[in-house]
Each structure stands twice: as structure tokens, then as C-alpha cells.
Amino acid sequence: MEKIKIILDVDTGSDDAIAIITALLSDELNVLGITTVNGNKPVENTTENTLRVLDAIGSKVPVYRGCCTTLISELSPARVSRVGAEETIDENGEVVAYHSEYLNLPSAKNKAQDKSAVCYIIETIMNSDDDISIVAVGPLTNIATAMRAEPRIINKIKRIVLMGGGYKVANVTPAAEFNIWKDPEAAQIVITSGANVLLVPLDATHAGCMTYKESEEFRKIGTPSSNIVAELIEERIKAYNAMQPMEIPDSAPPHDALAVCAIIDESVLKDIRFERIDVDFSGGLCDGMTVIDERPFTPPKNAYIALGCDRNKFINMVRQRLIKNKLSK
Ligand code: BDR
Ligand code: CA
């Protein structure tokens, strides 16, 4: 079986960590490198967190540190409007957050590579046989910067599967999803680049929530990977219960892991449409919103978007990988 070659772009992050583990335990994938970006936390933290996960599961996949600020949005303090809380105190008086400053894992022994993520992406894609895909689960700053610096990569990237956006669902503001909102100019550059782009938005990831049933089952597997995933799911359920309760009680979406599963088997997603998608980067109330134009007379369609997920299939895909527990590289 020919493996799907990917570069995984992350802002680790609790669900990014689950995505990294899922990717590295997938036989179907050849994870060439992991690039980090400013997002859930500053890039120093997201890089350290990524390295911690790799150390904990014994992976030597190279990690490249990426952009430490967004393209433009952070230059303007006025851009931050109606942002939801990222942490709170729960009913037991405990601080609960979607993402802790650092993952609760030993400090990383391995280091990031010297080369920057953007240079790595450009060189790797330019030297490829047009057979490398990108799975991007953080703000799109690295990918957009690489596209601007070397536009020839756009037609050489096989596919971009990105976790981001929303159709009927938003999180960080009433209109926007975090990854797109954090760097909306970068998202607009990537989504309208002409590359083959598939968005895995909140509409899909919220349909793939995991519960304590899953975390307990994963913990029973008893490997370092399954213990980390179990702990992170539980941490996320506490945060979602306190700040953003999901339809299924006591559950939370491990968003980024769904994008990894989608590049392996697209049938884990439901209701995939080809649409005209643009990002609002005007700085107003809808800053960072993914605008999906379904009118029949729209400008050319530019990206695929999935509006649902096969929850059982998703949980099974993660479960099977944790049980098999074999690093793909
Ligand atoms: C996305 O935002 C981040 O907080 C998560 O890691 C995920 O990539 C969900 O909106
Ligand atoms: Ca993420």
C-alpha cells in the first residue's frame, strides 16, 4: 500500500496532540515532518508541546518551528471583538481551559530543527513529485507565507485538508472559528489559492464528539499514547462542559484528529460540498467568518467543505490506531 505523504501543521494544543498521535499511529500515512505555528499558544509553547508528544510516544519525526505572529491581524488591537472565554473556574473551583500553557507531559528532550517551518514546507514541496499533502490544524500563517514566498508550491501540493471554519457553527466569536479567525488573511490566501482544499469545519467536528466512555476505553488500552489521548479527552470534556456544552452530555470534540482521519478515509466525513468560500478579514463583527456562497451564480467554486461526520467511524479509527500502537515511521 502506498502511503499518503503529509506535512502536519499544528498549534499544539490538546486536540492537536490527539491529532499528532492519530497521524503517527496511522499505517496509511508517511508523516514527513511536523510544522508548528502560533495559535492556541505562542509558537514556543506549541513547538515544545509538539516535541513533548513525540518524546512521550517515541517518535523521531522532525519538527520545524514556524511563524510566531499572524500575518497582519495582531497588528490591530481593534480586531479582537467578542472573543469567547478560553478558560474559566468550574463548579469545583478548578481552573479549566481548552488548552493548558504546556501539556502535562515531561519537558521535551528532542529539539526542533534549525530550519524554519516555512522554508521546510517550500523546499519539501518543491523537491516533491507533487505527491505531498498538507494537513493543517492551526492558523494558516505558515502555509500562506510559504505560498506567498514561493507560489509554485500551490500547484505542487497534492491536497490541503484543514481544520477550520464553520457553516452553521462558530466558537471564538459569534461568526468565526478559532483557526480561521486567528489569522483570517492567511486563511483567505490559502482557501482561495487554487490549491485542492478541503475544510473540516466545526459543523463536522462537533458531530464527532468523544465522551468519558471513549476516554475510559482508551485508558484501558494502557499504552503511553492511549493514556495521553484519554487524559486529553477528559480535560477537554471538563472545559467544554464549563464553557461550551455540546449536544451529547459530557462530551467534547477532538477537532484536529478528524482532519487527520479525513485524509486517510474521506468517508469519515459526511455531506461534502464543493463551494465558493471566502474569509471575512474586514476587522468587523464577522472578522474570520468563512462565508459560503451557495448562490447558483457565484464566482467559481474554490474549496470542498464537509458539514458532518460519521461519529462511530471516527471513534473507531482512533481506537484501532491506539490498539495497534505501531508508529508509522
Ligand atoms: C481549533 O482551534 C483550536 O483551539 C483547536 O486546536 C482546533 O484546531 C478549533 O476551533
Ligand atoms: Ca489546533
Image: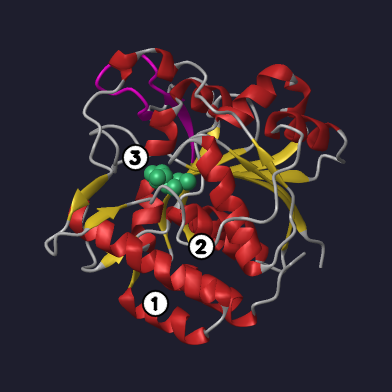
Q: Is mark 3 within 8 Å of ligand 1?
A: no
What kind of element bears circle 1?
A: helix
Q: Answer yes or no: do the residues labelled 3 and 2 have beta carbons within 8 Å?
A: no
Alpha carbons under labels 1 and 3: distance apart: 27 Å
Please report whichever mark, 1 or 3, sits nearer to the chain's N-terminal start: 3
Q: Is residue 258 magenta?
A: no
* Residue type of the residue flagged with mark 2: Leu
Q: Are marks 2 and 1 in contact (CB under 8 Å)?
A: no
Comparing marks 2 and 1, which lies closer to the viewer? 2
Residue 130 can be seen, yes or no: yes
Residue 316 seen in the figure = no
Residue ID at (25%, 47%): 87
Residue at the spot of label 2 = 105
Q: Which residues are magenta?
A: 274-292
Give, as a three-letter code, the residue at label 1: Glu
Q: Nearer the viewer, mark 1 or mark 3?
A: 1
Label 1 crowd bin: few (<14), some (14–19), many (20+), radius 10 Å: many
For disc 2, the neighbor class at 10 Å (few under 14, some 14 to 19, many from 20) is few
Residue 40: image quadrant is top left
Which residue position holds label 1? 214
